[in-house]
Image (spheres, coloured by chain):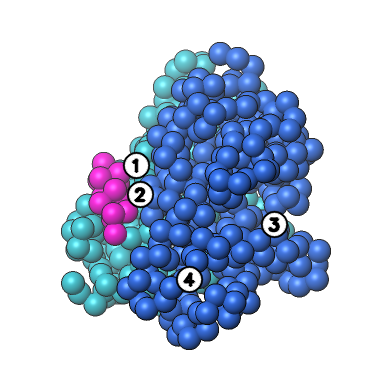
Chain colours: A cyan, B blue
Amino acid sequence: MSALTSSVKAMVFDTFGSVVDWRGSITRDLTRWGAENGYSCDWTALAVKWRSLYQPSMEKVRSGQREWTILDVLHRESLEQLLPEFGLEKMTEAQRQHVNKVWHRLDGWPDAVAGLTRLKSKYIIAPLSNGNVSLLTDIAKYTGLPWDLNLSTEVFRCYKPQPQSYLGVANILQLDPSEVMMCAAHNDDLAAARKVGLKTAFWPRPTEHGPEQKTNLSASENWDIVAKDIRDLATQMGV
Amino acid sequence: MSALTSSVKAMVFDTFGSVVDWRGSITRDLTRWGAENGYSCDWTALAVKWRSLYQPSMEKVRSGQREWTILDVLHRESLEQLLPEFGLEKMTEAQRQHVNKVWHRLDGWPDAVAGLTRLKSKYIIAPLSNGNVSLLTDIAKYTGLPWDLNLSTEVFRCYKPQPQSYLGVANILQLDPSEVMMCAAHNDDLAAARKVGLKTAFWPRPTEHGPEQKTNLSASENWDIVAKDIRDLATQMGV
């Protein structure tokens, strides 16, 4: 057993993009829903634009410009901003709520359930996502992610990449930061985790943002593990 | 489908005594450990006395007499108090830590895994225990409890039966209190949950405290569900 696989006790996973395919899932879900409910637009473009408002909306919370607000609320505000542009202003309140909750109905990438199930046999596994607890609970049930527990940054009342996100995990699990591995398809998330002492694992999701993706195609640092996907991560972690 | 089974979305479970058998588990675990490590005493008596210090130790936190402190720390302080009485003062620091963590190694009652697995197919299921997150995570892995998420009162920085324990669950899951069912073998826990609007389910654990048990042998109020055990609870909840 390597030093790494014997020292790591818990593995926490970025979720949007790394474990679940938000762009593909939103496109599939809302295309069907739109056809059934008389709305049509470029749902992929809506998903991408919606996601582009994600970081700016959290930044207002991180910077202290607004008080703690969960992601479901931020998503809803961003959606409201986009509805006119996509010709969707006629949606009722109930329909807006349903569409906003599409972030609770995301499918895992094809390797996610199989890889996580193997990892769970040896390590504590949990999401560490900016999605709120309710959102992460719904995704896990929807797509069958076998988490041991649900570590939303909501529990720590902050948003990644704020250091208390990563240190909060170590604290609540009573582990040293070096016993926790941050696992993600995003280099910036791993850089922030490494800075406060966590181990790191990367795999690319080259189509997270679509076929033209330019970012996070490969590891930007010598992360502790660089894998092909979550199945390969399990193999490299000895399970 | 009854009004009850269609309105309840999440079922949260008292853990010590209701889902896991702390008295039997501690006796089995420490009897074996004691034999291997040269310590002998009445381990059942130790478990019972240790548990009797549980409520008083939390009461200091609930009353504000001391600041927020997780249960592992309270357990350790109570253990220190008991060691001389049981002739165990010679234990090393590492041994004390191992013995204190016996609360992380509790077996489920025989119906727990089967009943919870059935309930998970329809409802969000989680512990709602005064055990800290790390303790509940370890128990779930140790005994195979298939929780969807891990709702320790540590997340809400309070101890049951404080109302924010129960209301915290509804809030974090974005549910109305009436959509959450508190499930326990303890009438007082259910009374506190009902007071703030939760649904309630009871089943007895007539040997939780041993063969002479006098408390919680039956339902003290007309709880929404009164079951024989967690398997029967699943049947009554339609799964």
Question: Which residue is rendered at x = 62% and y = 56% of the image?
Answer: B130
Q: Measuring from the top left, give residue A54's x and y in whole percent.
A: 53, 51
Q: Are marks 1 and 2 in contact (CB under 8 Å)?
A: yes
* Gap between marks 3 and 1 measured at Cα: 35 Å
Q: Measuring from the top left, give residue B138's x and y in whole percent.
A: 44, 58
Q: Measuring from the top left, give residue B85's x and y in whole percent.
A: 59, 77
Q: In the drawing, what numbered circle is on residue A35?
A: none
In the image, the segment drawn in magenta is A110-122
Q: Is disc 3 placed on a helix, strand or loop?
A: loop
Judge whether B186 appears above or below A171 on screen. above
What amino acid is found at the position of numbered circle 1 in the picture? Gly
Mark 1 belongs to chain: A
Single out the mark in the foreground, 3 or 2.
3
What amino acid is found at the position of numbered circle 3 in the picture? Tyr
Question: Which residue is rendered at x = 73% and y = 43% of the image?
Answer: B188
Question: Which residue carries the number 4 mark?
Answer: B41
Number of numbered discs on residues: 4
Mark 3 belongs to chain: B
Question: Which residue carries the number 2 mark?
Answer: A19
Q: In the drawing, what numbered circle is on residue A108?
A: 1
Mark 4 belongs to chain: B
* Gap between marks 2 and 4 measured at Cα: 49 Å
Locate the C terminus of chain A and report the quarter of the image it occupies.
bottom left
